[in-house]
């Protein structure tokens, strides 16, 4: 987790420096987006802890946190012209397609957590790996390899670990746990992708 966070902060610095040297407002805003998502990820658990009733529904609370984080992050990214890898036709398009994917992965993670309890760090780590797979491999954003996909990995990690269920004794990170999380996360990611695409088509939108 510390390794991924290191690359994430290097990406923050990289976007900022590129923006300053190239006079690119978009790159400067990208640096700001990374910082804002990090600040919200720190604040959201404190808000939930102050609200009554959330502690007794860990699954609902976790998925609500994923939903709110995804809505916030995708809104900022779309306003900066990068929604769906720059292919989004508008905010509604981006949110309809992208947010169900995050919620789907989160659902898979939570179900895996019920089978093999995970710490917040494990949620972050698996979220970062899914971020690398989705943004770099599936979406073909190979330029992200400049810093090992640090921006995408950091964002996905924070979205999927902003507020995780409390666990006193997480299970060891072994092959069985990795397979469970990967399988359930991927399966529900695909469900979310199909759901988002279907909703967009039903609303009269055209496919990517």
Image (cartoon, rainbow, N blue to C red):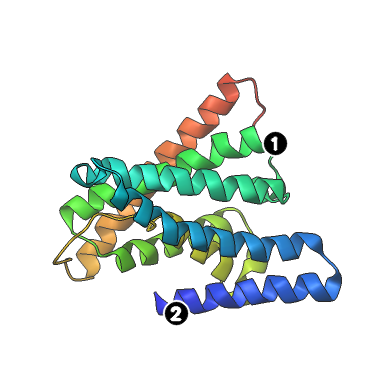
**Which residue has dot 2 on it?**
3
**Circle 2 SS class:** helix
- N-terminal of the pair, mark 2 or mark 1, is 2
At x 39%, y 47%, the residue is: 65
Q: Quadrant of residue 21?
A: bottom right
Left or right: 79, with 154 as reference point: right
Decide if residue 142 is in sight here: yes
**Which residue has dot 1 on it?**
90
**Circle 1 SS class:** loop
Left or right: 170, with 129 as reference point: left
Q: Quadrant of the N terminus?
A: bottom left
Decide if residue 189 is in sight here: no
Q: Position of residue 66 (x, y in %)?
A: 41, 47
Q: Residues within 10 Å of mark 1 (few under 14, many from 20)?
A: some
Q: Position of residue 96 (x, y in %)?
A: 55, 34
Q: Residue furthest left?
A: 169
At x 21%, y 58%, the residue is: 166
Q: How far apart are the two marked residues, 2 and 1, measured between alpha carbons? A: 34 Å
Q: Quadrant of the C terminus?
A: top right
Left or right: 131, with 15 as reference point: left
At x 85%, y 72%, the residue is: 22
At x 50%, y 66%, the residue is: 154
Q: Position of residue 144 (x, y in %)?
A: 63, 67
* In the image, residue 182 above or below residue 145: above
């Amino acid at each position: 987790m510390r390794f991924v966070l290191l690359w994430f902060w290097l990406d923050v610095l990289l976007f900022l420096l590129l923006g300053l040297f190239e006079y690119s407002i978009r790159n400067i805003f990208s640096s700001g987006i990374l910082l804002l998502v990090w600040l919200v990820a720190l604040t959201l658990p404190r808000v939930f802890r102050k609200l009554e009733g959330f502690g007794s529904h860990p699954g609902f609370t976790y998925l609500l946190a994923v939903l709110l984080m995804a809505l916030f992050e995708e809104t900022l990214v779309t306003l900066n012209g990068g929604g769906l890898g720059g292919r989004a036709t508008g905010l509604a398009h981006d949110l309809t397609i992208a947010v169900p994917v995050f919620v789907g992965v989160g659902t898979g993670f939570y179900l895996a957590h019920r089978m093999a309890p995970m710490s917040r760090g494990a949620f972050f780590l698996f979220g970062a790996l899914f971020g690398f797979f989705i943004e770099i491999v599936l979406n073909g954003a190979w330029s992200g390899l400049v810093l090992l996909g640090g921006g995408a990995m950091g964002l996905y990690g924070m979205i999927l670990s902003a507020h995780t269920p409390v666990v006193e004794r997480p299970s060891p990170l072994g092959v069985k746990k990795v397979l469970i999380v990967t399988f359930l996360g991927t399966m529900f990611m695909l469900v979310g992708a199909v759901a988002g695409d279907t909703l967009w088509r039903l609303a009269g939108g055209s496919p990517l």
